Amino acid sequence: MTRSFHDGLGEQVSQGGSLRDVPVVEADQTTVADVILLTQDCQYDKTEPGGLVLVAMVRSLSAVAPSHQGNVRSMRTFDLAYLPAETGRPETFVDLRRIAPLRKVEVERLSARGQRVASLSDDGQALLRARLHLFFSRQLPEPPRG
């Protein structure tokens, strides 16, 4: 059985929520891109509306050279988190090299305008957290002890 990494559109903004056509400031320029929320739910809830949360760009797998797409699909890259195609969604990846701050009020405004387009399932959120850990530490997280 194939695991689903998307979970429709959750009721609330949460880690792994996808937003479409978001103005993201990188260095000295603004890029409009699809993004995914990286900030954990508890931290998001505690952030004041004018405070900052973190997002990362979500890009189409077709943006990667065909000779490297297999490495992305099999998750042999530290900096890209693969999201498989699902009904109505093409193959994409979270580009962890392109993390940017965004004001929480902007996330809420975009969500209210219908630009929040998907949420990650529990499996998808677990994958995102593991990939973030791997990206920053270059090692896989230890399994829970118990």
Image: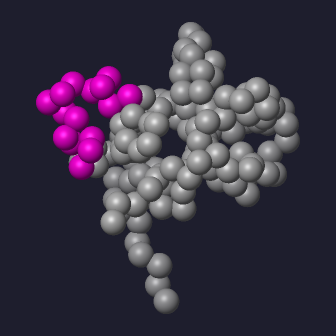
Q: In the picture provided, is 132 more to the left or to the right than 138? A: right
Q: Is residue 25 visible?
A: no
Residue 134: x %, y % from top left? 38, 54
| Rendered-image quadrant of the N terminus | bottom left
Q: Residue at x 50, y 30 (%)?
A: 57
Magenta: main secondary structure equals: helix
Name of the residue lying farthest toward the top: 29
Point out the stretch of residues depicted in magenta: 60-74
Quarter location, residue 116: top right
Residue 114: x %, y % from top left? 71, 30
Quarter location, residue 109: top right
Between 24 and 110, the one nearer to me in the picture: 110
* Residue 72 on the magenta segment: yes
Between 59 and 116, the one nearer to me in the picture: 116
Question: From what the image shows, is residue 28 above or below residue 146?
Answer: above
Q: Residue at x 46, y 84 (%)?
A: 145
Q: In the picture provided, is 15 more to the left or to the right than 90? A: right
